[in-house]
Amino acid sequence: MVGTGTQETLDSPGAALSGLSAGDAAERLTRDGPNELPVSRGPSMVRRFAAQFADLFAVIAGLEIILHANGHPVELGSGVRAVEQVYVDAAVPQMARAWM
């Protein structure tokens, strides 16, 4: 009861300072079920993996890592390479933590 005092609440039908009796609790459990919130599973592994590619720089960095690992290093301009290297240095550890 929102906005009521303690005494008003205790004076309402079915209220007691000692709480519910065992019988009342069992009846409510049968009628209403357990007092629990549903458990949220969170995003699936596929969705978490796909979220890594929401950023264009992540896609470019990922492709470069794959190409470099296969023996095909990508040569880019020095400015692009510097920005990309900073991003890879920051993103790869974060991506590794998200996948584990």
Image (cartoon, rainbow, N blue to C red):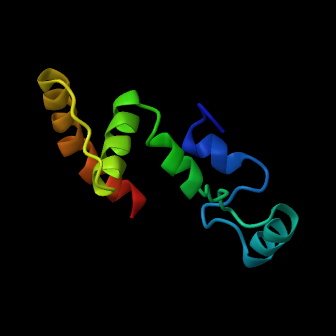
| Residue at 60% in and 61% down | 17
Farthest residue toward the front?
72
Residue 80 percent across, percent down from the top left: 20, 24
In the image: residue 21, left or right of residue 96: right
In the image: residue 52, left or right of residue 92: right
| Residue at 57% in and 48% down | 47
The quadrant of the image that shows the N terminus is top right
Image quadrant in which you'd find residue 56: top left
The quadrant of the image that shows the C terminus is bottom left
| Residue at 66% in and 61% down | 36
Farthest residue toward the right?
31
Between 86 and 73, the one lying in front of the other is: 73
- Residue 71 in sight here: yes
- Residue 43 in sight here: no
| Residue at 38% in and 55% down | 98
Q: Is residue 12 above or below residue 45?
A: above
Between 65 and 5, the one lying in front of the other is: 65
Image quadrant in which you'd find residue 20: bottom right
Image quadrant in which you'd find residue 33: bottom right
